[in-house]
Image (spheres, rainbow, N blue to C red):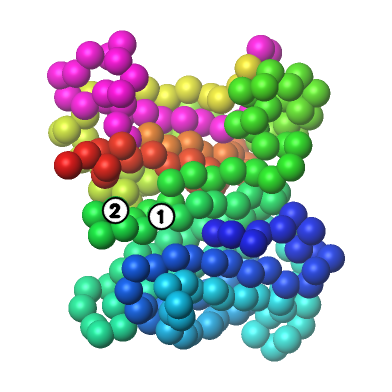
């Protein structure tokens, strides 16, 4: 996704840009976090891109101002054939995502947060002011709930448990600040646990309550291997 602005509430609309390598029919939908459909748009990619837009109104044209929304893009080859990627994204607290599609791989490769409250940047830069602020506002989730959601997400991504050792899970943070972001990593069966490259599948979940979370990172290193 490109052209995403943290000032969307002032601009009154949001625009997405997806790159495709062949003509695609697409359906773009926006939902409330409760599941209510707010917007639907269908079309054909143009010039190697899909560029849906939404003006923050519901199906009747009434303005909406929720804290977060679920965005769905489904597409399939214009000439017919198997259905393409279906990805459900929750963009909340100014989160955005990066999508890559090639003949051998398609999917979301990175989610990040705009501005000074980017937790990944706060951790890597040891920004204690941002870490403190994020930690104070973070939702926390019991480990049992994390694993419940992890197992569902892993199933959706087609992670085969037989190919990996027991996954490891930890909460992201630095110093005494924990951010309510839980990362799970899968190591190839029988591989060296010290070699980080053997952890070929991983994803992170940001808790939105004690029982719910959104996906914020996803990595699949094997997708790039010949």
Please give the name of the residue rendered at 66% of the width and 12% of the height, measured from the top-left corner.
175
Quarter of image, res 208:
top right
User: Badge 2 is on which residue?
Assistant: 105
Up/down of 78 relative to 145, above or below: below
What residue is disc 1 on? 100
Q: Tell me the residue at 31%/49% (across/down).
A: 157
Q: Residue furthest right?
A: 10
- 173 horizontally vs 13: left or right: left
Q: Gap between marks 1 and 2, in whole Å? A: 8 Å
* Residue 206 is inside the magenta segment: no
Quadrant placement of the N terminus: bottom right
In the rendered image, residue 198 lying in the magenta stretch gets the answer yes
Q: Are circles 1 and 2 on residues that touch, CB within 8 Å? A: yes
Where is residue 108? Give x, y as percent.
43, 51
The part of the chain drawn in magenta is 175-201
Q: Which mark is residue 12?
A: none
Up-down relation of residue 92 to residue 137 (above or below) = below
Instruction: Locate the C terminus and report the quarter of the image it occupies.
Output: top left
Q: Please determine whether, in this image, residue 108 is positioned above or below residue 206.
A: below
Label 2 secondary element: loop
Along the viewing direction, whichever of 225 and 136 lies nearer the viewer: 225
Left or right position of 59 against 25: right
Depicted 190 relative to depicted 96: above or below: above
Could you classify mark 2 by the number of other residues whose Cα lies within 10 Å: few (under 14), some (14-19), or many (20 or more)? Answer: few
Q: Position of residue 29 (x, y in %)?
A: 53, 74
Relative image position of residue 128 (x, y in whole percent):
76, 19
Q: Residues within 10 Å of mark 1 (few under 14, many from 20)?
A: some
Observer able to see residue 135: no
């Amino acid at each position: 996704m490109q052209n995403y602005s943290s000032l969307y509430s002032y601009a009154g609309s949001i625009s997405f840009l997806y790159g495709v390598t062949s003509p695609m029919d697409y359906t773009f939908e926006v939902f409330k976090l409760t599941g209510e459909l707010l917007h639907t748009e269908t079309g054909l990619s143009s010039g190697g891109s899909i560029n849906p837009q939404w003006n923050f109104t519901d199906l009747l044209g009434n303005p909406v101002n929720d804290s977060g929304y679920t965005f769905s893009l489904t597409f399939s080859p214009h000439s017919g054939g198997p259905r393409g990627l279906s990805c459900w994204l929750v963009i909340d607290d100014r989160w955005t995502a990066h999508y890559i599609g090639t003949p051998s791989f398609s999917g979301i490769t990175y989610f990040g947060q705009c501005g000074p409250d980017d937790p990944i940047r706060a951790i890597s830069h040891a920004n204690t002011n941002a870490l403190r602020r994020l930690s104070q506002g973070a939702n926390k989730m019991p480990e049992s709930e994390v694993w419940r959601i992890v197992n569902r997400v892993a199933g959706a991504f087609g992670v085969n448990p037989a190919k990996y050792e027991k996954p490891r899970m930890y909460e992201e943070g630095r110093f005494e600040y924990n951010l309510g972001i839980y990362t799970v990593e899968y190591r190839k069966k029988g591989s060296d646990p010290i070699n980080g490259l053997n952890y070929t599948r991983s994803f992170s979940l940001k808790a939105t309550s004690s029982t719910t979370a959104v996906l914020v990172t996803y990595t699949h290193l094997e997708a790039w291997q010949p």
